[in-house]
Image (tube, rainbow, N blue to C red):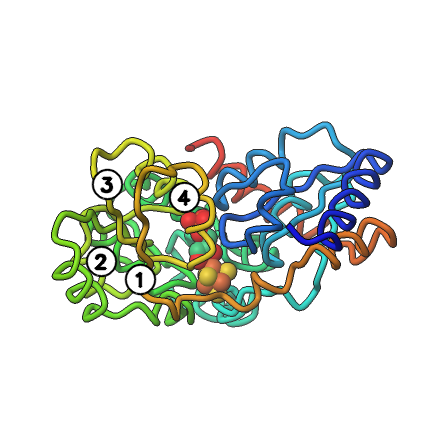
Amino acid sequence: MIDSDARLIEEILRLKRERNAIILAHNYQLGEVQDIGDFVGDSLELSQRAAQTDAGVIVFCGVHFMAETASILCPDKVVLLPDMDAGCPMANMVTADALRGRKKEHPGAVVVCYINSSAEVKAESDVCCTSANAVRIVDKLPSGIEILFVPDQYLGHYISTKTGREMILWPGYCPTHIRIKAQDIIKLREEHPQAKVTVHPECRPEVIALADEVLSTGGMCRFASSTEAKEVIIGTEIGLLHRLRKENPGKRFIPASDQAVCPRMKLITLERILWTLEEMTPEVKVPEEIRLRAKASVDKMLEAA
Ligand code: 13P
Ligand code: SF4
């Protein structure tokens, strides 16, 4: 570690104590950001952790919808996002207005929204889900009803194949995960015949079809530590490799594609975390009327999980 980083970290830790803050970091964050996190996890684990914390301030090292979810669950806490430009492009592919329009075309449909969506979209939805629990949540819906799933068409397609439920899919996608191509997996399997292949359900269907396991980032961490395999091909954003390598020094983790980088996740740096704690800004706060409706769909998910 370079000296300037050590000084930054010291300052961050001092201010964190002074402000009674907790640092939550997503698995795709830069390695040095993950390393100062009080908790590192996937979207579901982070929302559960936010809901449970006693800290008065949450510094959310992730993207905007994740900080919003923390604000939805913890209205009395100050939720800080060190860079307001850290938005999820997939979440921005559906707006509340557009969703309201689609609901009018399907008046009886149950709306299931991926957690990668704005608070306004969650407020227009009946139940939320993450990649860790999406199949279980859709499986539990009463049979015979129409299901509208937003915004990730590929996660939606995967859920349909697992549950046998037909769903109306929104045409959203993750620009990072679609960079992983079937050809990447085929080539890596040839080069590493003993390796297990894990991919995120945001990947294209033809990539998912080639995988041994389809998992959330938290699921990949659990799989990595429990598998007998010594080599694992990782079909998700490359930030996860930091944690996998740190927790499993005896195993080899191979990125499915070096191009699977989420630039918005990488906007959060140690410098910005320090600045955020000094200035106590920028804060993410969901207006109460939207929060209450969004919370109902997030609560339904957490109860089911
Ligand atoms: P996880 O919930 O699996 O961590 O995924 C979040 C995400 O944004 C995937 O691109
Ligand atoms: Fe959004 Fe994709 Fe980045 Fe996840 S990896 S935050 S879905 S753009």
| Marks 4, 1: nearer the viewer | 4
Whether the residues at callouts 1 and 2 have beta carbons within 8 Å, the answer is yes
Residue type for callout 1 = Cys
Left or right position of 131 against 280: left
**Tag 4 secondary structure:** helix
Of label 4 and label 1, which has the lower sequence position? Answer: 1
Which residue is found at the position 37% from the left and 67% from the top?
258
251 to 253, vertically: above or below: above
Contact between labelled residues 1 and 3, with CB atoms less than 8 Å apart: no
N-terminal-most mark, 1 or 2? 1
Q: Which residue is mark 2?
A: 208
The picture places residue 158, in percent across and down from the top left corner, at 26, 55
For ligand 1, tell me if the residue under mark 4 lies within 8 Å. Answer: no
- The Cα–Cα distance between marks 4 and 1, rounded to whole angstroms, is 19 Å
Please tell me the numbered disc located at residue 30. Answer: none
Q: Residues within 10 Å of mark 2 (few under 14, many from 20)?
A: many
Query: Disc 4 residue type?
Result: Leu
Q: Is residue 63 left or right of residue 74?
A: left
- The residue mark sitting in front, 3 or 4, is 3
Task: First in sequence, mark 3 or 1: give its number.
Answer: 1
Label annotation for residue 244: 4
Relative to the observer, which residue lies in front, 70 or 282? 282
Tell me which amino acid carries mark 2. Ile
**Which-is-in-front pick, marks 3 and 1?**
3
Residue 255 in percent (x, y) is at 33, 59
Q: Residue at x 48, y 44 (%)?
A: 42
What residue is shown with label 1? 203
